[in-house]
Structures are given as C-alpha cells and as structure tokens.
Image (spheres, rainbow, N blue to C red):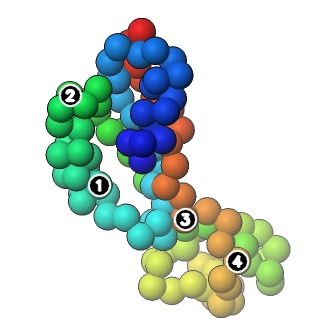
Amino acid sequence: MLEVAKEEVTRQNALRVEAIYIKLGQLSGVVKEALLFSYNIACEGTIFQGSRLVIEELPVIVYCSVCQKERTLISIQNFSCPICNTLTFDVKQGRELEIVALEIQT
C-alpha cells in the first residue's frame, strides 16, 4: 500500500504526507487494528512518518437473485439475504483494500 502511495507522492513532488485514506472491506482479509499498527511501523523514517491512516470500513453487500436487490449481510458468517434468507455468493462490495485519497503538502 505504501509503495503505491509513494509512486503518487513522487509524481506530485510532495514534501510531506499528512494522511492516506483507504477503503477496507470486511472480506479483504485484513484486520483493521493490525493494519493501523503495522502502518505506523512501516512509516518510520519515510515521507509517511507522522501521517494518519484513515480507514473507511465497508460492509459486505451481496446481490439476492430472489429479491433482485443488493443487500447488506448481517454477518459474514452467513451469506444469506437478510430479507428472504436465500443463500447467495454474488458479492458486490466487501473485498476492497484500496487507496482512495492522499493528503499531501507540496
């Protein structure tokens, strides 16, 4: 994640990075607390040192073929439509781990 951000920071000739904003889906395989902890360690001695990592947590949204609507799962332990209880694995949101914005000083 920092390598991707570093490419953009270099392109913008930034002097300092204030914050990185990311979207983190519940199915991304990344634990928010672990990401925050490792972020601070990875930033030491770099242009990112002292910056904030702002995480927008995204719920899992699936498409229910019976209701013909997108529905937010109540639990990632149960991939059933919360309205009609139909089993579904058509995930529309929840796998994300992406940088959406950088706050920099130039």
The CA distance from mark 2 to mark 3 is 28 Å
Check disc 1 and give the amino acid type. Leu
| First in sequence: mark 1 vs mark 2 | 1
Residue drawn at (22%, 52%), measured in percent from left and top? 38
Q: Are marks 4 and 3 in contact (CB under 8 Å)?
A: no
Position in image of residue 16 (x %, y %): 32, 18
The residue that label 2 is drawn on is 50
- Disc 1 and disc 2: Cα gap in Å? 15 Å
Which three-letter amino acid code belongs to the residue tagged 4? Asp
Farthest-out residue, top: 106
Q: What's the CA distance linking mark 1 and mark 4?
A: 27 Å
Whether residues under marks 1 and 4 lie with C-beta atoms below 8 angstroms apart, the answer is no
Q: Nearer the viewer, residue 45 or 93?
A: 45
Which label was assigned to residue 35? 1
Which element type, helix, strand or loop, lies under badge 2?
loop
* Distance from Cα at disc 4 to Cα at disc 3: 12 Å
Would you call the spot at circle 1 few (<14 residues within 10 Å), some (14-19), or many (20 or more)?
few
Q: In what quadrant of the picture does the C terminus appear?
A: top left
Q: Position of residue 11 (x, y in %)?
A: 53, 22
Three-letter code for the amino acid on which mark 2 is drawn: Gly
Callout 3: helix, strand or loop? Answer: loop
Q: Nearer the viewer, mark 1 or mark 4?
A: 1
> Is 43 left, or right, of 4 in this rendering?
left
Q: Given contact means CB atoms under 8 Å apart, are the residues at marks 2 and 4 in contact? A: no
N-terminal label among 2 and 4: 2
Residue with the mark numbered 4: 90
**Closer-to-camera residue (55/75):** 55
Q: CA distance from mark 1 to mark 3?
A: 15 Å
Q: Which residue is mark 3?
A: 95
Residue 56 makes an appearance in the image:
no
Q: Nearer the viewer, residue 53 or 2?
A: 2
Mark 1 vs 2: CB contact within 8 A: no
